[in-house]
Structures are given as C-alpha cells and as structure tokens.
Image: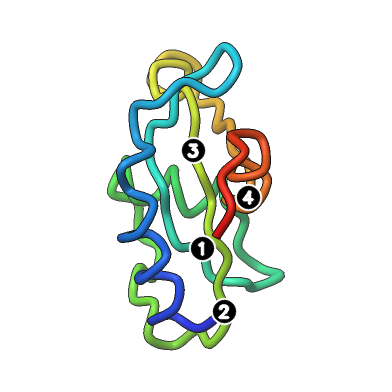
C-alpha cells in the first residue's frame, strides 16, 4: 500500500490501541516501509529510543501496517512483539 493509504488505514483503526488480543494489549499501530534493509523491530526501536535512523517515510513507496503489542515488555527487555494489521483484524473478527 502507499504511504497515504497506510496513514488512512492507521487513522481508521487507531481505536484498537489499548484493546486486548489474547494475553497482550495493542500498544501502537504504525506504518512500516517495506524495505529489505529495515525491520519492524529496527523502526520501532529507533522511534522510541530516538536512534539515528531515517524516519522520513517520503522516500519509500510501499508500506505495511504493524500492530505493536505489550509496550511494557519492550521497555523492560527491548523485545518487540508485533503482527501485521490484517492478521489482527482477522483475530478480532473485524472485516474491512
């Protein structure tokens, strides 16, 4: 999906932040550029730790939406738990 489509989708599903899915709660819903050199974990860690990574999404053309779970586990152990938004919508039985 494009950058604009990704941000529109995030706006549509932002209400899910804080909702329980299984044993974890949704902590964030983020656009992630599709790039073989960048992982979801790297993006999430760089944003929340203010690490020097290019955060300008305008240079990327394709995106996916990552749903980040269990922010406390990230704070305590640096572990990023995430799923693709489409997986989460299926788990919650939400249809677009």
Q: CA distance from mark 1 to mark 3?
A: 11 Å
Q: Earlier in the sequence, mark 1 or mark 3?
A: 1
Q: Position of residue 71 (x, y in %)?
A: 40, 25
Quarter the N terminus occupies: bottom right
Q: CA distance from mark 2 to mark 4?
A: 13 Å
Residue at disc 1, secondary structure: strand
Camera-nearest label, 2 or 3: 2
Please state which of residues 75 and 14 is positioned toward the viewer in this rendering.
14
Based on the displayed image, in which of its 4 quarters is residue 53 positioned? bottom left
Q: Residue at x 51, y 63 (%)?
A: 32
Q: Position of residue 86 (x, y in %)?
A: 63, 53
**Crowding at mark 3 (Cα within 10 Å: few <14, some 14-19, many 20+):** many
Residue at disc 4, secondary structure: strand
Above or below, 5 relative to 20:
below
Q: Position of residue 9 (x, y in %)?
A: 42, 65
Marker disc for residue 32: 1
Q: CA distance from mark 2 to mark 3?
A: 19 Å
Give the residue at mark 4. 84
Q: CA distance from mark 1 to mark 2?
A: 10 Å
Q: Earlier in the sequence, mark 4 or mark 3?
A: 3
Q: CA distance from mark 4 to mark 1?
A: 10 Å
Give the residue at mark 3. 68
């Amino acid at each position: 999906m494009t950058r604009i489509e990704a941000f529109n989708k995030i706006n549509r599903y932002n209400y899910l932040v804080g909702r329980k899915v299984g044993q974890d709660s949704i902590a964030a819903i983020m656009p992630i550029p599709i790039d073989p050199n960048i992982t979801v974990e790297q993006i999430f860690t760089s944003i929340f730790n203010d690490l020097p990574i290019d955060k300008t999404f305008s240079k990327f053309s394709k995106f996916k939406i990552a749903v980040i779970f269990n922010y406390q586990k990230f704070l305590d152990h640096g572990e990023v738990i995430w799923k693709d938004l489409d997986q989460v919508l299926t788990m919650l039985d939400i249809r677009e």
